[in-house]
Image: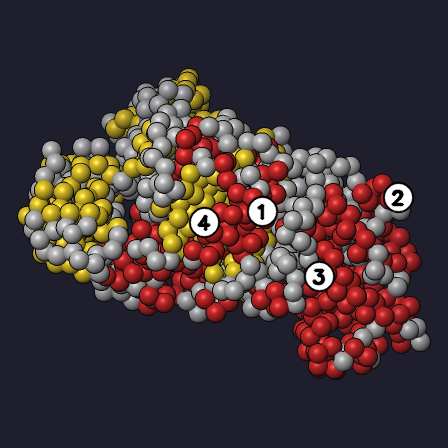
Amino acid sequence: MKGVIKKISGPLVLVEGLENAKMYNVVLVGKLGLMGEIVRIKENTSYVQVYESTLGLRPGEPVKDTGMPFIAELGPGLLSSIYDGVQRPLKEFTSESDFILRGMSIPSLDRKKKWNFKPLVSEGDHVAFGSVLGIVKELGLEHRIMVPRGISGKVGKIKVGSFKVTDKITTVGGSKITLMQKWPIRLPRPISEKLPPKKKLRTGLRSLDSLFTISKGGSAALSGGFGVGKTVVLQSIAKFSDFDVVIYVGCGERGNEMADLLDSFSKLKKGELPLLNRTTLIANTSNMPVTARESSIYLGATIGEYYRDMGYHVGVISDSTSRWAEALREINSRLGEMPGEQGYPANLSSRIAAFYERAGVIRTFSNATGSLTLLGAISPPGGDFSEPVTQNTLKVVRTFISLNKKLSSRRHFPAIDWTSSYSLDGIGVDFPGWAFSLLNREAEIEEVVQLIGPDALQDKEKLVLLIGKLIREGFLQQNAFSKDAFCTEEKSEKIMKAIEIFKDFSFSSLANGASFEEISSNHFFMEILRLKNRSPEEFESQYKSLEEMLL
Amino acid sequence: MIKEYQTVKEIKGPLLFVEGVSGVSYGELVRIRDETDLVGQVIEVGEGLAVVQVLGNTLGLSRRSRIRFSGEVLRLGVGSEMLGRVFNGMGVPIDGGLMPRFEEKIDVRGNALNPVSRDVPSNFVQTGISTLDVMCSLVRGQKLPIFSGSGLLHHKLAAQIARQAKVSDENFGIVFGAMGITNEESRFLINSLEGSGALERSVLFLNMSEDPTIERLITPKMALTTAEYLAYEQGMNVLVILSDMTNYCDALREVSASRGELPSKMGYPGYMYTDLASIYERAGRIKGKAGSITQLPILTMPDDDVTHPVPDLTGYITEGQVVLSRELHKKNIYPSIQPLSSLSRLMPRGIGEDKTRLNHQSISDQLYALYARAVELRNIVAIVGESVLGESDKKILEFAGNFESKFMNQGFYENRDISHSLNLALELFSIVPESELTKFEMSASKEENHGKETNEG
């Protein structure tokens, strides 16, 4: 179907004459064939949001309707790839230019690379959507080749050997099956059953694992103004969490950050293999087209769901969903639609809810269990949480991590505010109730100190401040660039135990007549503060001597 | 084919609505002839109607204006002869010289750098300013804005950084883009570049406060296009100073308002984040290429409010910020960098054993913690007096006083190397009791403290 350009306004192009125009169909705009999507239809005019710069386009240039919505290519080769928001492979682009030029087009999955396929079904078996036909080894992960949607029936002759993603490996009910399948990104992949999230994610961050747990299959949002360390926390989760597969979406964020991520993921190891082997990166930095930013998080969720359907635990991390919402706002405004709150589209709330609903633990069609965990950053203007993106996200996520400017300006990292964050997935075992109440008591005493000065406090109150410092600096604070970046459950429990031993010791010493100065100058106080940074051997010996001395 | 029209339908603010056009492309450069000659850009085009944004003063424009569509986008001719020259905000020489010869003509909007091609910034840039070098280190390829306020000495600081960063790098270049700054300020910058011999390695684009507002939208793009050429074609390490980004954003708001666009916060357009990103993201390094672009944008925060949209959106894009404090400035401390609100996100990559010193990070963390504690204590003292403080708290206050007067405070011509700055910090630590040094382990041997030193500069 051919149409012609009528009007160009930034990334929005009005096209006349696309007779079979359907919402969200992909169209190729102008002589360069720039990729775009139909976002509104009015009589004979289609409104197209273009994924690349529209500079130089002229009214009258042709527009071609591909007749299909925006689809992702799913198959072996996704892992360790880096894509832009419309799944163009960025590594492959570099052979042409260091800059992203327009109209560049390379298939998402490598068409030449061959993969070793091992069938798990035999000729004549009956299979349906989601059944596993066989496996391919993809960078250390068992990539399960599944029956695509709309196909079922008997397996035809099935081949063993090495194939390109487009080669026929078998037929099902007469339809050709390849290693690759396609899926429209805006449509969640169907599931057989949703299960309640039960397993906890181990992120290695004490403040999350102990205080504000995230479940596998859960959803979490991190909100905070600039400079509070959202990205550091998210990257740390991407690096150390016990996911099988991680999809990291850099949505409208910094280019240098993506380069850093790429660099450190290639160097860091997970077991024997580079971390990048379990990761797909989607990079649509802030200077790349705003429309492709909008699609990038859907692309991430779709790739995530694909691995989930194989029975894996997948995390999709989006930094930042605010940039995605701003892209919605920009397109909405160009369409001249009536805005809702702060200029955002009126359906922002349902768009956000629909996205986070893609998270969950599921039973796959081949009766395995997989999960998709969605983690998103929110960048509220001025750090003000009353804005629409934060508020609408709060309604739907299970874990809300509030990052606090006050903490970050005290260099308390991760700057996770323990008073306003919450998790519906429960608290970990290693953060006992007494520690929580002590932190609350500490905050009360701090207020008093502001009025009367620290020396006016009683020794008991000073001790609360001292133990509070231990909890904050010895336990909650964690340097993402040190060896302490990933903390095991055991280590975390022991640090807390050490703090508890010291707390009991100091309160009983005080009751027995010791002075505050004696207690605070006890060398174990400093030792516990530094415990988290000790090497495993030093840690054990310090912990032992502490137990012996103080118990 | 170039056509000329005399079919202006409406003139509104900086916008011209031209009827009856055909074959016009989006983003095309337009020449407008009336009493004066002007250029403009097509910002919207439909069949038979083009909206042209006039880059200049619309004074005297009429419906009789003759509009000529050039068929090409706004491009800048770049070449190494640009070094040492002064241009206006649109790229026309204003130093009395001829237009320099250009080696190529480049679309000023630039293309997005492929994240895969980016090299991670990891080379320490020694600015010679203690607070920056020790606590908020600048790294080559970084974009680190200066958040300032009216009346603060941001231009003095920028000039000092430009002069001192140049000293240690023979391949150093400066591109300066001025948007709506006063003649006084620009003269100061030019003079101080000239005085240090840096002018011949500089390219200046000046849009002064009396120049048309709209030109300001083009000036940073001119500056960055030049910087990209110098960095990636000529292998130079380019420092780009853009001042004042608040004026740029105000120009953006003006155009948006006259287009009747839906405003977001404080009347600024909803796409301001994207627009600012298209400027700031042009900092960086490319794998396999020698040069780099480091950006030092300057913005003045209206009413010193960091939550104002301009600093707020900037902070979300840039890799940290250097915040100038009015309070420190009033105490006569120069540079009045407030370390507690300043941050360099790329600092961990740029410092450490082979770059500055092994314990650089811990020294910085310790300075930070002590100074933050001192600021808290000062608040208490203001209410209840110093008598309520314990001995160690008093020591911390003493530390803070020395920190401000000896460490933060330095002369305009005082260039401290990083090793000197770090040692200065160690000296200050000796004021406080060791139990207060929680971020940093004062080690027994002096050599270990002072670490292995390599000075990249």
What kind of residue is marked 3? Glu
CB atoms at circles 2 and 3 under 8 Å apart? no
Q: CA distance from mark 2 to mark 3?
A: 27 Å
Badge 4 amino acid: Leu
Label drawn at residue B242: 4
First reached walking from the N terminus: tag 2 or tag 3: 3
Q: Residue A244 at x, y = what percent?
A: 53, 40
What is the residue that sits farthest to the right in this orientation? A513
SS at circle 2: loop
**Can you tell which of label 2 and label 4 is closer to the viewer?**
4
**Disc sitting over residue B404 in the figure:** 3
Chain holding disc 4? B
> Circle 2 is placed at which residue position?
B445
Q: Earlier in the sequence, mark 3 or mark 1?
A: 1
Residue labelled with disc 1: B161
Q: Quadrant of the C terminus of chain B?
A: top right
Q: Nearer the viewer, residue A193 or B331?
A: B331
In three-dimensional space, the C-alpha distance between marks 4 and 1, rounded to whole angstroms, equals: 13 Å
Q: Position of residue A404 (x, y in %)?
A: 57, 63
Q: Amino acid at mark 2?
A: Ser
Q: Which of B348/B89 is in front? A: B89
Mark earlier in primary sequence (4, 3): 4
